[in-house]
Image: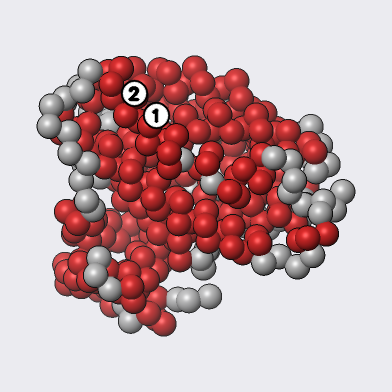
Amino acid sequence: MTTIRDIDLDLRALLRDPGEGGRRLAGTAERAFRDAEAYATYHRALYELHDRDEPETDCERRAIASPAYRCEERNISRVEVPVALPEAALIEAIDRQVLSGGRGQHPMIRHLFGGQMTVEEVRLFLRHQWFRTYRLYQDATDLAVNLAYDLEGAATMARYLYQEMGEDDPAGAHVALLANLLRELDVPCDPGARSTLLEEIVYLNNRRRSFRSPEIGWAFAIFYVTELVVSASHQHLYRVMRDVGVSEQGAEYYRVHIAMVPPRAKREWTFFWRFLQRREVQETFLTSLRHHLEVERRYFDAVWRVMQALPGRAAGRAR
Ligand SMILES: [Fe+2]
């Protein structure tokens, strides 16, 4: 596994002087927009900086990342919204982006939903689902902190986190249900799992930056599209899991989302719309959505390449 020591930015050195660390990381972030090597260095460093359970250095690590995050936000090309759109037109603009660039159109997802996946392919898909999901509640907690000044925002995020964490039973936390599913198929589900796939790291870094951004449009876009896509895809994924022999109990992770998410997403949208009536929030939202979908497509392309290279893939379904 690549560590921060291999890639020229030493985490401990950055932590000794967070001000200087922040300037160095932001310098790498700036170069990352012009240079592929700097891009990989920056994202691997950022991932090493944040993907850890280390509360004693949390404030310093956030301070180091903050100038780099702002640098990214200045460099990501903006969607221009000259005049604030009415609600129906904004929903249409979101649907258009999701329909043309969302994961539903990706060949890996079409292959998965087409019912042709082998068990090995399903296992690989789930391994990456783990990397995507097991810290999602932590990212959402950052959004909850940003919205805590707003009573309705605090209530919206409290409800989301309460449901995600299994309501009054942590054994029913969605991350615990996903771990049950993965164990049934012998897929590793360690809570300290670290990805080595650059495109996946970029996806996770982008989500974390967006959820932490003081400009809430960055977070709203990813949060909302995740909820929207979840409701559409979990019915398919539930069936795929049952088809490859997962038990009813093992597939509960997907089953619980089918009824839970659509009404929740509707309530969340009503809350977001209060903020989204402002032109500049719409612009940030649509910029974030477009960027997230591009990052996600490159990520799914990378997993799809690995999947297509699996041994014995042509042999068809294993059971
Ligand atoms: Fe969930």
Which residue is the site of mark 1? 95
Asked if residue 254 is positioned above or below residue 203 in the image, the reply reads above
Task: Tell me residue 318's x, y (percent).
Answer: 85, 53
Q: Nearer the viewer, residue 313 or 198?
A: 313
The residue that mark 2 highlights is: 91
Q: For the point 13% across and 27% down, which residue is it?
A: 83
Query: Decide: marks 2, 1 in contact (CB < 8 A)?
Result: yes
Q: In which quarter of the view is residue 79 placed?
A: top left
- Residue at image position (78%, 60%) is 314
Identity of the residue furthest to the right in this view:
319
Q: Is residue 307 above or below residue 240?
A: below
Q: CA distance from mark 2 to mark 1?
A: 6 Å
Residue 192 x/y as whole percent: 55, 60
Q: Residue at x 56, y 22 (%)?
A: 260
At 49% from the left and 48% from the top, the residue drawn is 135
Identify the amino acid type marked 1. Asp
Q: Which mark is residue 311?
A: none
Label 2 sits on a secondary structure element that is helix
- In this rendering, position of residue 304 left or right of residue 268: right
